[in-house]
DNA sequence: AACCACTATTGGCAGAGTGCCAGTAAGCGT
DNA sequence: ACGCTTACTGGCACTCTGCCAATAGTGGTT
């Protein structure tokens, strides 16, 4: 029982390093189970530290969760951006290519993407809502650019693209989660839907301007 | 200070009546603030009862919340069903009429609808997920019927309609929440989007069947 | 009108979880 | 080797939930 000269009881890490490690652990747990059923002590133990340290780094549990979601939400976007950057630079990628790239990224990070957009159903919380909304808005901007609609970037265009975003998320769920669509079928829908609407609906919508109550 | 013959300290209500009352109070609070920040004691006090009673009726806080969301999610659906039932019975309402009815109902229950679709606090809670998913699936079925697609009710049709559901929710947000669209503009989009996709995309999607990896 | 039985309702206790902070010790610089 | 910075621990205080035994409205019965 007499501890005959044990080494250090714990190792001391670089600030950012430890932070990253806890964040990664939290990410794993939060993508597996809902927020409420994951306790801070569980995260701490899984990361091999104490609960106190977790609070030292992230303040509150909620704030740690936000950090995680932010990461989850950004990774696909960044993934696509990188993919686009890696594409032949002679011109901006075509719409079809962008869709394909996006689908590949999402397919790879399946779990992450699913929890990220479901965290969106956490709309009740303001901070959370902002994170997701901003991410979607950024994606919309990207889409507008790829479609070459930058010149006429009206509220109507943004709204329509956001609408397409909702469509895309749902179609992706049909493909990855409910599995009622194959990847190829989902691709056809995603590629075709938006241009069709831009051509046939956008003019009508714009013509209805200022006619509100 | 000596209580000179006070009346009953509390009134005893019918089981369902009290239940309804608590539910209504909870509904008010949950539509105003996120799940985590509303405590059971707050609900109880606002309803003029004790926390114990709340648990007596609903078991757990979560279960009470589910009850509330179920209500919120059903009310628009029921509203539309009633509206359809009230319509001239000579034939099933046309697509445009259904959309108009739906928009009116949602406009009336603005707050309720907005919290309902963004409910789910902990993102991936199973029970919550099921409630919302089932409601959306029911709506999809309704849409399929109105569009007269009952004969060919394939997985592809369901998936496409669900996709449209995502589109519709987002467009409605653009109209009621972010206010980038007028009601009329939103109407044009909602009415036009789905038929267009059914005509132009559905055939392609069906032709791609069985081509998955 | 007094009583009784039924159950809606209360009040408080036990356990879980979060937030916080004062103290402890790892390990780098000198 | 020694001290100084600060990463890290351990435990206390508080809030909140879940539960249950005791209490008291109230309608029905005589």
Image: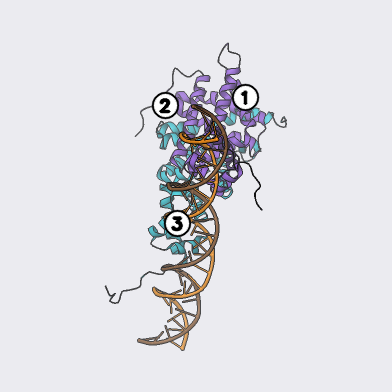
Chain colours: A purple, B cyan, C brown, D orange
Q: Which callout, 1 or 2, points at the residue further toward the start of the chain?
A: 1
Q: Relative to residue A79, is residue B111 drawn left or right?
A: left
Q: Could you say whether the residue bearing mark 3 is in a helix, strand or loop?
A: helix
Please tell me which residue is depicted at 48% across the width and 41% down the height of the picture.
A56
| Mark 1 crowd level (few <14, some 14–19, many ≥20, 10 Å Cα) | some
Q: Residue A63 or A117: which is nearer the viewer?
A: A63
The answer for how far apart the CA atoms under marks 3 and 1 are is 47 Å
Select label 1 or label 2 by which is in front.
1
Q: Which residue is mark 2?
A: A155
Question: Do discs 1 and 2 belong to a common subunit?
Answer: yes
Q: What's the mark number on residue A100?
A: 1
Q: Residue B156 or A17: which is nearer the viewer?
A: A17
| Quadrant (top left, top right, bottom left, bottom right) of the C terminus of chain A | top left
Q: Could you say whether the residue bearing mark 1 is in a helix, strand or loop?
A: helix
Question: Do discs 3 and 2 belong to a common subunit?
Answer: no
Q: Position of residue A19 (x, y in %)?
A: 54, 36
Q: Position of residue A41 (x, y in %)?
A: 56, 48
- For mark 1, name the chain: A
| Res. B194 in view | no
Query: Up-down: is D17 above or below B135?
Result: below
Q: What's the mark number on residue A108?
A: none
Q: Which residue is mark 3?
A: B40
Q: Could you say whether the residue bearing mark 2 is in a helix, strand or loop?
A: helix
Select label 3 or label 2 by which is in front.
3
Please tell me which residue is depicted at 39% across the width and 59% down the height of the picture.
B45
The answer for how far apart the CA atoms under marks 1 and 2 are is 27 Å
- For mark 3, name the chain: B
The answer for how far apart the CA atoms under marks 3 and 2 are is 42 Å
Instruction: Name, please, the residue furthest toward the top.
Output: A90
């Amino acid at each position: 029982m007499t501890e005959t000269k044990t080494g250090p009881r714990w190792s001391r890490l670089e600030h950012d390093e430890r932070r990253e490690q806890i964040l990664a652990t939290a990410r794993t747990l939060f993508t597996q189970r809902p927020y409420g059923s994951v306790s801070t002590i569980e995260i701490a133990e899984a990361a091999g530290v104490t609960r106190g340290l977790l609070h030292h780094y992230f303040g509150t549990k909620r704030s740690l969760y936000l950090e995680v979601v932010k990461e989850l939400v950004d990774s696909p976007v960044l993934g696509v951006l990188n993919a686009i950057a890696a594409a032949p630079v002679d011109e901006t990628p075509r719409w079809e290519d962008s869709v394909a790239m996006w689908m590949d990224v999402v397919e790879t990070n399946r779990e992450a993407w699913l929890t990220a957009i479901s965290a969106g159903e956490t709309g009740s919380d303001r901070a959370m809502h902002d994170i997701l909304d901003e991410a979607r808005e950024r994606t919309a901007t990207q889409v507008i650019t790829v479609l070459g609609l930058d010149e006429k970037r009206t509220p109507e265009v943004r709204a329509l693209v956001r609408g397409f975003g909702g469509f895309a998320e749902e179609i992706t769920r049909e493909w990855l989660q409910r599995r009622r669509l194959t990847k190829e079928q989902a691709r056809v829908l995603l590629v075709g839907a938006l241009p069709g609407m831009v051509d046939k609906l956008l003019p009508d919508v714009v013509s209805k301007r200022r006619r509100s109550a």
